[in-house]
Image: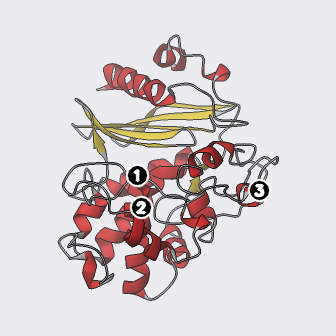
Amino acid sequence: MVQGILGGINLRGLTPSFSLAVVKEGKFVLLKGYPDFLIYDCASITKPLLTFPLIEKHLALNEDARDYIPHLPYSVKIKELVNHTSGLIPWLPLYLFNKPYTETIVEKGFKGEKGKKVYSCLNYILLANILEKKLKKPFKEISADFLKDFKNCFIPPLKCVNVAPTERGNLFEFEIAKRFVKNPDKRKFRINRIIKGETHDLNSHYAGGIAGNSGLFTDVFGVINLVKNLLKSKNWQLPLFEREDYFYHLGFTGTGIAIHKRENVFVVFLSNRICPEVKDIDFSAIRHEIFKKVFEKFV
């Protein structure tokens, strides 16, 4: 059945490992782990699975973010940070500036068009900072408290052997960082060593291992339980992106979730496709092809 879903997609040539699970009406209808069920750096699916439930629990979506960060350049609702319509640019190498993350985002990040949906990790880094101000404790501690209710969910660093490695150094991010900082310090990029058990995303790594945008580590079973938790929210679509038949979110390391609009079927795909290097392949299209085939078969 797995081959029927994957069709001509030879994942073994694209990623060292992967897990694929499909849940229909609350039960497994497909489950595969190659070569085993590993723990993955979930990357940006941290946003809908961990950060958004915390936001919804502790904040009102219509609150003004300036109530917590008064020096924002204009009024921004919590909801606008959640759904990427705040006007923030997609990314900044915050760890290369000698200022707190929030100050750098306020000074350099609000260069987009407010109201236009533009995916940005900066939205969720700000949301984590707002949670810290509201709850008066670090986001890492807030996240750890939340994850206590979920098995096999972790915050880095991890020492266990069944963690999927990612890139050999942050070479891809190093090249992107040059767009923002002249001659970035190579020592910041873990050059010439395989990253394993540490968050691949450097903004999260230098924030203590987890920030609002990235830092969740878990296996496919942990993600399934977190998706089920997300679906309890009446606003579960808010942090996700939309295709014709489903809502979804992807993660840079090779992860993704998709929930059919009928809400009766969802799919989880985890991989470490950036190990040992980021390949020049449209892996987003591959994940969407998997989602499409799953929904054609099971909805």
**Nearer to me, 62 or 71:** 71
Pick whichever, 59 or 179, lies toward us.
179
Give the mark, 1 or 3, whose residue is nearer the N terminus. Answer: 1
Q: Secondary structure at mark 2?
A: helix
| CA separation in Å, label 2 and label 3 | 30 Å
| Whether residue 193 is situated above or below residue 269 in the rendered picture | below
Using the rendered image of the protein, determine whether residue 111 is visible from the camera's viewpoint: yes
Label 1 crowd bin: few (<14), some (14–19), many (20+), radius 10 Å: some
Res 67 label = none
Q: Determine the secondary structure under disc 1.
A: loop
Q: Which residue is mark 1?
A: 90
Q: Nearer the viewer, mark 1 or mark 3?
A: 1
Q: Is residue 189 toward the left or the right of residue 286 in the image?
A: right
Residue where numbered disc 2 is placed: 122
Indicate the position of residue 260 as horizontal and vertical percent values: 28, 35
- Image spot of residue 57 (x, y percent): 31, 73
Q: Amino acid at mark 2?
A: Leu
Is 122 above or below relative to 266?
A: below
Question: Which tag, 1 or 2, sits closer to the chain's start?
Answer: 1
Residue at image location 58% in from the left, 52% down from the top: 177
